[in-house]
Image (spheres, rainbow, N blue to C red):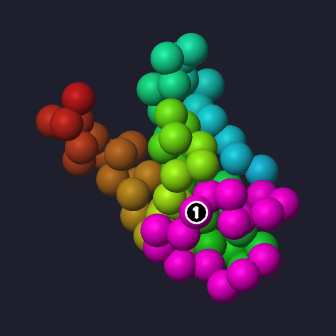
Amino acid sequence: MSRTHNGMASTDLQGVVWQKSLHSNANGTCVELAQLPGGEVAVRNSRFPDGPALIYTRAEIESLILGVKDGEFDHLM
């Protein structure tokens, strides 16, 4: 795998397993996440699986998930 970076093509992340939320539907309304070998997490839009991937550290993903659980982003829905 080449060096990971934000905006790289999802198809360049060979051997990763993308995971969708169980809340996704047939219209592709979800994002997918994949753990990378170095411990980072890749995120992509499920409607464009060949599109770009954003790469986050585990700490960044943890902060996001904790914020979601605390309701910090409820105003976006």
Where does the N terminus fall, quadrant-wise?
Answer: bottom right
Residue at the location (77% across, 51% down)?
17
Q: Is residue 23 in the magenta section?
A: no
- Above or below, 35 relative to 47: below
To which residue does mark 1 refer?
9
- Above or below, 54 relative to 48: below
Give the total of numbered labels. 1
Residue at the location (60% across, 49% down)?
50
Residue lying at the far right of the rendered structure: 15
Q: Could you say where residue 8 lies in the image, as x and y percent from the top left?
A: 54, 69
Classify mark 1: residues with Cα within 10 Å, few (<14), some (14-19) or many (20+). Answer: some
Q: For this view, does 21 lie left or right of residue 31?
A: right
Residue 41 visible (yes or no): yes
Magenta-colored span: 1-16
Asked where in the image residue 68 lies, by quadrant, the reply is: top left
Q: Could you say where residue 72 lies in the image, as x and y percent from the top left?
A: 23, 47
Q: Is residue 5 in the magenta section?
A: yes
Which one is in front, 30 or 69? 30
Q: Could you say where residue 31 lies in the image, as x and y percent from the top left?
A: 50, 40
Which one is in front, 40 or 66? 40
Residue 62 visible (yes or no): no
- Above or below, 10 relative to 24: below
Residue at the location (50% across, 34% down)?
47
Q: Secondary structure at mark 1?
A: strand
Q: For this view, does 14 lie left or right of residue 41?
A: right
Q: Label 1 sits on what residue type? A: Ala
Q: For this view, does 16 lie left or right of residue 3?
A: right
